[in-house]
Amino acid sequence: MESIRQQKISRLIQKEIAGIFIKELRDLFRNAMITVTRVRVSPDLSIARVYVSIFAVKDKSSIFEDIEIYSSEIRKHLGFKIGKQVRVIPELKFFIDDSLDYIENIDNALKS
C-alpha cells in the first residue's frame, strides 16, 4: 500500500510528465499522442514507474523505444519542474499501458 507521500509524488510526476510530452518534447515523438495513465513511486521515492498509452501512430513500439532513449531528457525536464518540491528526482522507468487496447479487444469480441 502506498503512503500518502508516495501518492502525492506520483500525481505530481504524472501531471508534469504529461505536460512535458505535450509542450516540450512533442516534436521528438513525431507528434504522437502520449498519455501518462499511471505513475507508481518506490517507497524511497528513487524510482518512478511511468505507464504510458500511445495513440495516433501506427508503430507504437518505435515511439516507445524513443521514449526510453530520451528518458534522461524527460528526467531533466522533470527536474526543472519539480526540483524545488522533492529532494531527489526519481529514475524514470517507462512501461506501455495496454489496458485500453485490451478493453477494445473485449468490446470487439462482444460485438461479434
Image (tube, helix red, strand yellow):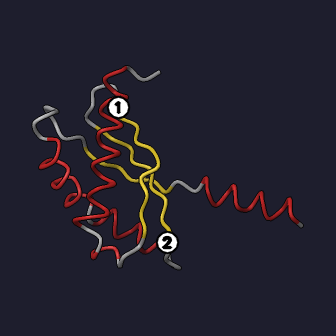
Q: CA distance from mark 1 to mark 2?
A: 27 Å
Decide which of tag 1 and tag 2 comes sooner along the chain.
Answer: 1
| Neighbour tally class for label 2: few under 14, some 14-19, many 20 plus, Cα within 10 Å | some
Say how many tags the image has.
Answer: 2
Residue at 78 percent across and 59 percent down: it is 107
* Residue 36 horizontal/vertical position (percent): 41, 52
Q: Is residue 57 left or right of residue 86?
A: right
Q: Secondary structure at mark 1?
A: loop
Please state which amino acid type lies under the numbered disc 2: Lys
102 w.r.t. 14: above or below: below
Amino acid tagged 1: Ser
Please name the residue shown 40% across and 37% down the image.
Answer: 40
Which residue is outermost to the right? 112
**Who's the residue at 47% across and 49% down the image?**
37
Front-most of residues 56 and 70: 56
Q: Secondary structure at mark 2?
A: helix
Mark carried by residue 42 = 1
Residue neighbourhood size for the residue with mark 1, other residues' Cα within 10 Å, grouped as few (<14), some (14–19), many (≥20): few
Task: State the quadrant of the C terminus.
Answer: bottom right
Position of residue 67 measured from the top left corner of the image (x, y, whole percent): 34, 64
Image point (25%, 64%), residue name:
23
Instruction: List the residue tagged with mark 2.
Output: 60
Q: Which mark is residue 62?
A: none
Q: Quadrant of residue 22?
A: bottom left
Instruction: Reply above or below: 64 against 7.
Output: below
In this view, the residue in front, 40 or 65, is 40
Disc 1, disc 2: CB below 8 Å? no
Q: Is residue 9 above or below residue 25?
A: above
